[in-house]
Image (tube, grey):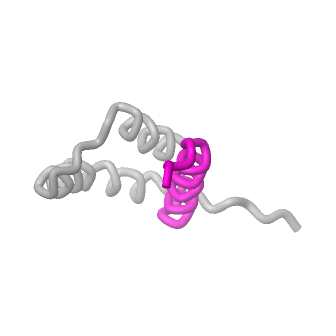
């Protein structure tokens, strides 16, 4: 038995893309603006049709990798 990795349907992906401008506007109200790198990441996740849970895991993993790559702060 093969277990397939869940992927978003066309309708689910279309809904995410439809809602993205509102999400950007909401973030902007909080003073948060997505970088070109952020936008590219979301585009990549769209292309891979990652589910919400998979997207969360990817973002957390990237955040942890970035933090561990930073030099330790001086005390």
| Left or right position of 7 against 75 | right
Residue at the (18%, 54%) spot, across then down: 22
Q: Is residue 47 above or below residue 24?
A: above
| Left or right position of 14 against 19 | right
Residue 3 % position (x, y)? 78, 65
| Left or right position of 60 against 17 | right
Residue 54 % position (x, y)? 56, 60
Number of numbered discs? 0
Q: In which quarter of the image is the N terminus?
A: bottom right
Range of residues picked out in magenta: 48-75
Q: Residue furthest top?
A: 36
Residue 34 appears in the picture as rendered: yes
Name the residue nearer the viewer: 1 or 68: 68
Residue at the (50%, 39%) spot, across then down: 44
Indicate whether residue 5 is drawn in magenta: no
Name the residue nearer the viewer: 13 or 63: 63
Q: In which quarter of the image is residue 39?
A: top left
Q: In this view, does 44 lie above or below 49?
A: above
Indicate whether residue 73 is drawn in magenta: yes
Residue at the (25%, 55%) spot, across then down: 19
Q: In which quarter of the image is residue 61?
A: bottom right
Name the residue nearer the viewer: 59 or 75: 75
């Amino acid at each position: 038995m093969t277990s397939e990795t869940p992927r978003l349907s066309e309708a689910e992906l279309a809904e995410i893309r439809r809602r993205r401008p509102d999400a950007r506007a909401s973030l902007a109200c909080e003073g948060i603006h997505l970088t070109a790198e952020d936008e590219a990441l979301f585009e990549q996740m769209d292309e891979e049709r990652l589910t919400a849970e998979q997207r969360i895991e990817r973002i957390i993993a990237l955040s942890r990798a970035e933090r561990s790559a930073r030099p330790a702060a001086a005390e």
